[in-house]
Structures are given as C-alpha cells and as structure tokens.
Image (tube, rainbow, N blue to C red):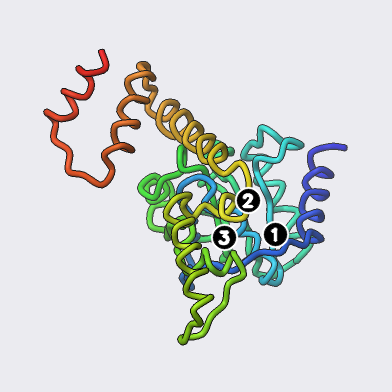
Amino acid sequence: MDERDIIKAIIKEYQQREMHLIPRDIKLPKTNKAISIIGIRRSGKTSLLFDLFKKTEKSIFFPLDDDRIFPPTIKTLQEIVKVGKEMYPNEKITFFFDEIQEVENWEIVIKRLVEREGHNVYLTGSSSKLLSKEIATQLRGRSLSVELFPLSFKEYLRFKGFEFDEILTEQEKVLILKYLDDYLTYGGFPEVVMEEENREEILREYLRTIIFRDIVERHKIKNIQILKLFIKFLINYHTKKVSINKLVNYFKSIE
C-alpha cells in the first residue's frame, strides 16, 4: 500500500470506530478560527476530539502519530486534506488533527484550510511541543486555544457512574466522601480514575514522561538529577510557602 491508500484506510477506520466516551464539562467556542485543544498529557484531549468528531457531519479525524504513516510530513497532511475533499466534494469540511506537532510546518496547511478555504479545524498536540503562545505565533490570530484539565470532581463522579439529586441519602453521602478521598489521593486523570489497580504506577509513569518529554527534552536540561530533586522538593512542599533560602538549604542537606 502506498501512503495515499494507508491514509484512506486510517480515515475509514476512525469513521467506523465506536467508543464509549463520557462527556466532559468543557465548552468549545463557535468560531471561524482553528481551535487548538491543549493541556497536560493524559488529560483526555484525544478522547474529547474524537467525541466531537463522532457528533460532526462531513468530518475527517486523523491521528498524526499513527505508526503506518510515521514520520508524517507536510505532504502527508496535504494528502489527508485531498482525500477529505474527495470524500466531501465542494463541501465545508471539519478536520480533526490529533498530535499535529508531529508534522513540521503544519501551520502552513492549517492557515490555508481556515483562512482561504473556510474549513473548520480542530487540533490537539503534545504539551511539550504545542503551547498556546506558540500556536498564537504560528497561526497569527487564526486560532483559539482551549485548555483541557484532568477531571473535576463533578466529572469524576460522572466517570464513576454516580448520579444524585439535591437531596442525598446517608449512603450516598458516605459514598461521595469515599470518592472524594480517592479523588484527592489519586487525582483526576481519566485513565487513573477508571483503573482499579496499578494507579500509583500509572501516575509515576506520567511523572516520568512529563519530566523527560516536556521538561528535559524541550529545554535541553543536562543535569537531570538536580531537576528530579527540585521536583521532589516541589511535591513535598506543594501546600506551603517556599523561600529561596529554604530551597538552598534543602539541596545542601542532601549533598
């Protein structure tokens, strides 16, 4: 199969894919600009994008980190657009591009789609390579950025299948307090909320990925050990005021 046939196959796969997705409490603006969904890793950006795609007519969803077309180039992006136009000729199309940062100079294609051709475009990308200020610079006023956070406690309860009225029974109050304790302990990352086991290991893996992909690689940090100690310090003192002197003394104490 050549790249064009692979692109067609991937598009068809996502059109046929069915996923049970629990809705999030985030409002995306109605605009003629490209909408970029940004946020910390594993906060649910791809799921949010796919959920919107399944509710949108005349739309194309494409994951640009798919190994079958990796590494994607600007020609890959252009070919995806061509296939979309063949599927919906002379129509206004909504394009959903997941992990857009994998394509170098991606903004050139997005500008054309939005500004000159009037299509709708939604983007997600890794926070290590796609920040709101960078999107604003690359698209120059042609985009709006929406930040997606991990689950709020209200969303957490929805993910747990817990529904309640304004008046709670004693049993419901006890269950909510149990869920609140769990939420405060493990947080609101969707995968962790739905996982009954290995939650601590998943969170540790998230932390490792964020440290190395979003901090070390992005900022080319050489002294990784000092960075790890600094992050450990921040975690241990996250509810307290911290002075520079306290930080200096902390590093001296572990020499």
Q: Quadrant of residue 223?
A: top left
| Residue at the farthest front position | 170
Q: Distance between the residues labelled 3 and 2?
A: 36 Å
Foreground pick, 211 / 162: 162
Callout 1 environment at 10 Å: few (<14), some (14 to 19), or many (20+)?
Answer: many
Of mark 1 and mark 3, the one earlier in the sequence is 1
Q: Distance between the residues labelled 1 and 3?
A: 10 Å
**Above or below 119: residue 134:** above
**Amino acid type, label 2:** Glu
Instruction: Please tell me whether mark 1 or mark 2 is closer to you in this view.
Output: 2
Q: Which residue: 37% across, 18% down?
A: 225
Q: Residue 60 has which mark?
A: 1
Relative to residue 25, is residue 16 drawn left or right? right
Question: Can you say which quadrant of the picture contains the N terminus?
Answer: top right
Q: Residue 196 has which mark?
A: 2
Tag 2 secondary structure: loop
| Residue at the farthest top position | 255
Instruction: Estimate the x, y position of residue 114 in percent, counting from the top left.
Output: 53, 60
Can the viewer see residue 143?
A: no
Q: Are marks 1 and 3 in contact (CB under 8 Å)?
A: no
Instruction: Estimate the x, y position of residue 63 in percent, counting from the top left.
Output: 67, 47
Q: Quadrant of residue 113?
A: bottom right
Q: Are marks 1 and 2 in contact (CB under 8 Å)?
A: no
